[in-house]
Amino acid sequence: MKRILAEYIWMDGHEPTQKLRSKTKVLDNIVSSVQDLPSWGFDGSSTNQAVGSDSDCMLKPVYKIPDPIRGGSNLLVMCEVMNPDGTPHISNTRSHLAYISEKFSEKKAWFGIEQEYTLFEGRNPLGWPEGGYPAPQGPFYCGVGADEVFGRDIVEEHLELCLNAGLHISGINAEVMPGQWEYQIGPLGPLESADQIWLSRWILYRISEDYGISATLHPKPVKGDWNGAGAHTNYSTKEMRANGGIKEIEVACKKLEKNHDKHIAIYGAHNEERLTGLHETCSINEFRYGVSDRGASIRIPMQTSNNGYGYLEDRRPAANMDPYKVCAMIIETTCN
């Protein structure tokens, strides 16, 4: 019988932004359900999740997809980190989203997340001249041609691998800054959208290795007159998607305004470098919402306004945000 490889993936305890870690488990049998995957221990003292004198942590498989890199029956497995007694580790942010998702399950929340990232070759964004700057931003967004886009081979392979893994990736595009790209995941329920963002990030990091390129989610990877990198989070409930749902969207916007500081605190490290009021952002110290306004904290799409129902776009989350935290807080704020 052919053995299979399961890549166990988890979030470490690094601060202020958790990193992805993974290791490979060899299994004797094909796995049909995530419940069939065994828990697996690891050295938490090497991932900032334990001290050396009490270092054991456990990986609990919670979501699996086909491994599009190794192929065959091999798997990528998203895991929660647990303490030895079976309780969620303090770094385990997924467990809280699971609780919130269940608590407000009747709301049938959907999320669509726009993940921006920047490709780097050494110390420079991919395609930038050594020690210098390219032409001012403008021609690069959704551009075509070797003088306007850089890294398309990586981006196309990432798209294909995500599709082959069954991820709900809905689009890709070159972004405003050269070397910067975006892909979208969703719409999906809270847990699935967040799991798929983390797994799609792992795939991006992994294939970038093969090209000698690194991908960063830093919200302002290049200082100066360049767009930052965000993770615009599109959100709706069943009431928002029903006829007349625009009223529910406006109520949600007012609740988000009252809790602006609370949200900003978990929307990603170094986000103040990006949310300046320039480059299609609202200042981190302000909150406003509006129709078709990409300089607002919350954008209500024109189609939603015209239809009278639909969704809102929270433009505040940084590219390095934790989708488990962001999805949980948006639901808690708008559904309470």
Image (cartoon, grey):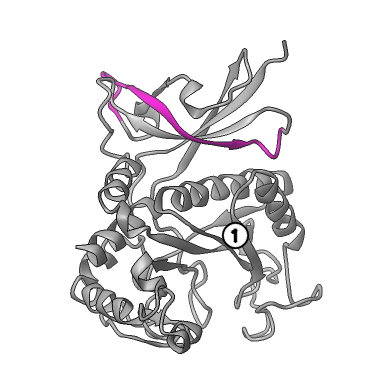
Is residue 115 in the magenta section? Answer: no
Residue located at (60% from left, 18% from top) = 26
Three-letter code, disc 1: Arg
> Which residue range is magenta in the image?
50-70
- How many residues crowd around disc 1 within 10 Å: few (fewer than 14), some, or many (20 or more)? few
In the image, 173 versus 334, the foreground residue is 334
In the image, 17 versus 329, the foreground residue is 329
| Quadrant holding the N terminus | top right
> Where does residue 254 sit, x and y in percent of width and height?
23, 79
> Where does residue 156 sit, x and y in percent of width and height?
74, 58
Residue at image mark 1: 123
Is the residue 111 above or below the residue 45 in the image?
A: below
**Is residue 274 visible in this depiction of the protein?**
no
Residue located at (39% from left, 29% from top) = 46
Is residue 65 in the magenta section? Answer: yes
Residue located at (45% from left, 66% from top) = 219
